[in-house]
Amino acid sequence: MKVASKEMRTAFKANKELDIRFIDRMQDDLFDMMDMANDINEAMSRSYAVPEDVDEGDLMAELDALEMDMGTEATISEKGPSYMQEEEIELPSVPEPDAHPATEKEAAIKS
């Protein structure tokens, strides 16, 4: 019995995986990892600004109505819906450059 006890003690000392402190630290690390995984799962499953009582049928009906509005607007104007059309802005015309522009610096250099 003494021999077996001595053998177990030397086996525990020689083998790091059999040390109780090592096992406790490993379990603590595993619990920490599980807590982090639970926190991540909880964050991923949150619903942001979406009411819980939203009916999918109502959403599809609203989408269909929007598509119909866009379709009728597109048939009225071939350019697309009015909110996507750019307004035409009248810009002043660009002045024609002179054949030989003379600036004050050029005149000062020539004289």
Image: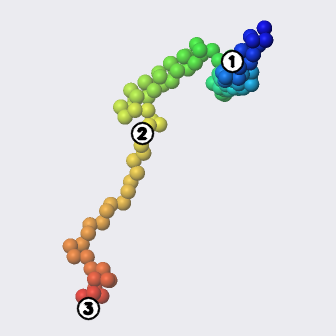
Query: Extreme left residue here?
Result: 99
Q: Is residue 8 left or right of residue 110?
A: right
Residue 33 image position (x, y, % from top left): 67, 25
Please tell me the numbered disc located at residue 85. 2
Residue 36 image position (x, y, % from top left): 68, 26
Residue highlighted by disc 1: 11
Dot 2 or dot 1: first in sequence order is 1
Dot 3 or dot 2: first in sequence order is 2
Residue 89 visible in the current orientation = yes
Q: Is residue 69 left or right of residue 48?
A: left
What's the residue type where badge 3 is placed? Ser
| Rendered residue at 24%/88% (across/down) | 110
**CA gap, disc 2 and disc 1:** 82 Å
Residue 34 visible in the current orientation = no
Secondary structure category for the residue under label 1: helix
Tell us which disc is closer to us: 3 or 2: 3
Task: Check if mark 2's residue and mark 1's residue have beta carbons within 8 Å.
Answer: no
Secondary structure category for the residue under label 2: loop
Mark 2 crowdedness (10 Å alpha carbons): few <14, some 14-19, many ≥20: few
Query: Extreme front residue here?
Result: 3
Query: Extreme bottom residue here?
Result: 111
- Tell which of 41 and 79 is nearer to you: 41
What's the residue type where badge 1 is placed? Ala
